[in-house]
Image (cartoon, rainbow, N blue to C red):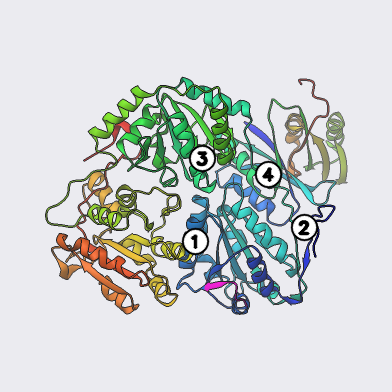
Amino acid sequence: MRHTISALVENKFGVLARVAGMFSGRGFNIDTLNVGPTHDPLYSRITITVLAEDETQLDQAIKQLDKLVNVIEVTHFDSSKSFVARELVMLKLKADASNRSEIIEIADIFRAKIVDVSPDSIVIEVTGNANKLRAFFELIKPFGIVEMARTGMVALPRGYKAED
Amino acid sequence: MKTQPVVDFPAQDEKGPAMKGADCVVACLEREGVDVVFAYPGGASMELHQALTRTKKLRTILPRHEQGGGFMAHGYARATGKAGVCMATSGPGATNLVTCIADAFMDSIPLVAVTGQVFQEFIGKSAFQETDFFGMTLPIVKHSFLVLTAEELPMIIKKAFIIATSGRPGPVVIDIPKDVQQKVFEPVFPAQVEIPGLKPDPHASDEVLRSVLKMIEGAKKPVLYTGGGILSAEASNDLRKFARATGIPVASTLMGLGAFPPDDPLSLYWFGMHGTVAGNWAVCDSDLLICLGARFDDRITGTVSKFAPDATIVHFDIDKSEHNKNKTAQYPIHCEIGYALRRMNELVESGPFAKPDLSAWYEIIKDWKQEHPYPFSYKPNEKYILPQDAISALYKQTDGEAIVATGVGQHQMWAPQYYQFSEPRTFISSLGLGTMGFGLPAALGAKVAKPDKVVVDIDGDGSFLMNVQELATAKIEKIPVKIMLLNNQHLGMVVQWEDRFYDGVRGHTILGDPTNIGSPDNLDGIYPNFPEIANGFGIKSRRVYKKEELEDAIAEMLAEPDEPFLLDVLVPYTEHVLPFIPQKKSAKEILTE
């Protein structure tokens, strides 16, 4: 199962290495990782997604994470929490005059943007949650993905919590 | 004349005169109340050593290996509860401290390790004696700092001591490049520092604590399982009070030894792989197991599913990451141990609390204690001195009041079996990491911390040789520790496992010449000659192998309180540490012969 973990940390060198070490030392592969400063330049937010079968092991890693002196707060976004998660992906596809319009059509459905076009390629920027991106990839893959870069998931809890 | 100020002003930062970074480090250490550092110099830390020569408030002890220095600081911290400070240069000096840092991390010991680093302009250039020590130690520190600007030194050092000693204690590394040590500036010593990630000690609510007392009221076979957390929290007296008020028997881990007196009727002394039969069985059969500051280590639990299988487990810990890590506790309670015990004692006193009638449980335990003589027993040998004899004799001759450090192996288990510790901070051993070579330097550190106590390193010949160079420190720094070497010419614990699980095949566990193995019957084969080694270091020694000379030899070892002494006790290698719960077995499968 995929887990999204968000850590509010001090914006200092070495913090990312400590956080990443908590996962690598326990044999978890970090699936996606995003780091960026928050509105307060003293703090950064690290968002990590990991695939973990052993939930007690993951629970351990999260508690250990919370123990790090540079870590202020850890949030585990699991199914019990209402949150929004988004990722930005850029992909370069093989595209020429024959299939370009078809690609643009699909991109439009997913509200993706064409950010570069050349005679034999096209670069698309798409944002969304994991499900939307998966659906998009499914449709776009047959055109031939040449390169792909993704930001990693970022997540925040929702303001209005219906279930509370 | 001074009058009371109308308003309480918060403590003010203090500005110091211009000084070098290295002098600032020393000034900061003094402000933290450090009275001794264990420091081995080198190119990248000589500025610090020059600064150390300029202070009169700090004693600098020169170990003969950085690992020795690290374990001295560890021993000092174990004996006092204060942070121990060690220092080394960059590169190999620092890497020699890695084992000490890992050891302190495993046993939750406050250790501040200051290391020199190459000039910042050389960092990352594979400079001479450069290593990324900050990166290398990341998984084994509670926290670490690489100081990039000299002005940050006072703030960082203050933080380091707070982090090392607060909450669950642990090691902190401060890596200081040489240019930072040389920078001349006017330091500002902060009155307070802010560490946003450091949470205040957790306190459980009265409601939660009352619910624990409620469970105790209904328990038939309760046991308190107490660990090193009791010592870290300085809560031994609170534990004693709590145990007596509730009548619950106490089984300790080795880390928690001394928190509860072994001669108390409620004591089960220590349990685990080589612990008392009564202790192991009581924990196994308990219906309510209250764990206080321990971490369900595999040497305690054996097979986790067979550990206290019928018990409701309440786990008090200051570190919530210990909850449900190895064994699921139905009631994990995130709370500082001292507070939990004191508050529960208050709640017991203020009542209502009905002390449970545990007489049936006491009877069962009493039977176990008779069936397998409590706490430990062994068959004496008519001819040879056994390791157990030597430790029992030492216990008697020191009135049980010595501080004992150990190496790792059989002797490390026999020491707490036959030397019974009734006060906290008197048993100093590498228990989590299990580092051979720990005993002598740790004993030296403890003796520096507690000069009025008799400090004995009970060691094995394998372990002792791993930091034997510290005999020089004992001699030159005039630290009169006593070394009782249980010399069996083998790596005894591994030999024991070879005997039991590998048909006695010796996989490189003979320490002397395998074609002429030394023993009390073959003195010519004894290798190396430890009394001669001691002599080379200028330390008095004696070899003993005749049973009738043992008492006299120990008396001689202890006679001169101001002299270090090595007593080389030749013992047969054939003794096994018993009882013994083999790995992955349950307490009920304990071997007693």
* Chain to which the residue tagged by mark 4 belongs: B
**Is the C-beta separation of discs 3 and 4 under 8 Å?**
no
Q: Which residue is mark 3?
A: B238
- The spot of residue B398 in percent (x, y) is 32, 58
Q: Of helix, strand and loop, which one carries label 2?
A: loop
**Is the C-beta separation of discs 1 and 3 under 8 Å?**
no
Q: Residues within 10 Å of mark 2 (few under 14, many from 20)?
A: few
* Chain to which the residue tagged by mark 2 belongs: B
- The spot of residue B279 in percent (x, y) is 35, 36
* Comes first in the chain, label 1 or label 3: 1
Q: Which residue is mark 1?
A: B76
Q: Residues within 10 Å of mark 3 (few under 14, many from 20)?
A: many
Q: Is residue A133 left or right of residue B330?
A: right
**Is the C-beta separation of discs 2 and 1 under 8 Å?**
no
* Comes first in the chain, label 3 or label 4: 4
* Chain to which the residue tagged by mark 1 belongs: B
Query: Residue A40: within the magenta?
Result: no
Q: Is residue B518 above or below residue A39?
A: below
Amino acid at the residue labelled 1:
Tyr
Q: Which residue is mark 4?
A: B199
* Comes first in the chain, label 1 or label 4: 1
Q: Is residue A54 above or below residue B54?
A: above
Residues at marks 1 and 4, CA–CA distance in whole angstroms = 27 Å
Residue at the image point whose x is 40% and y is 31% from the top: B307
Residue numbers of the magenta segment: B55-60
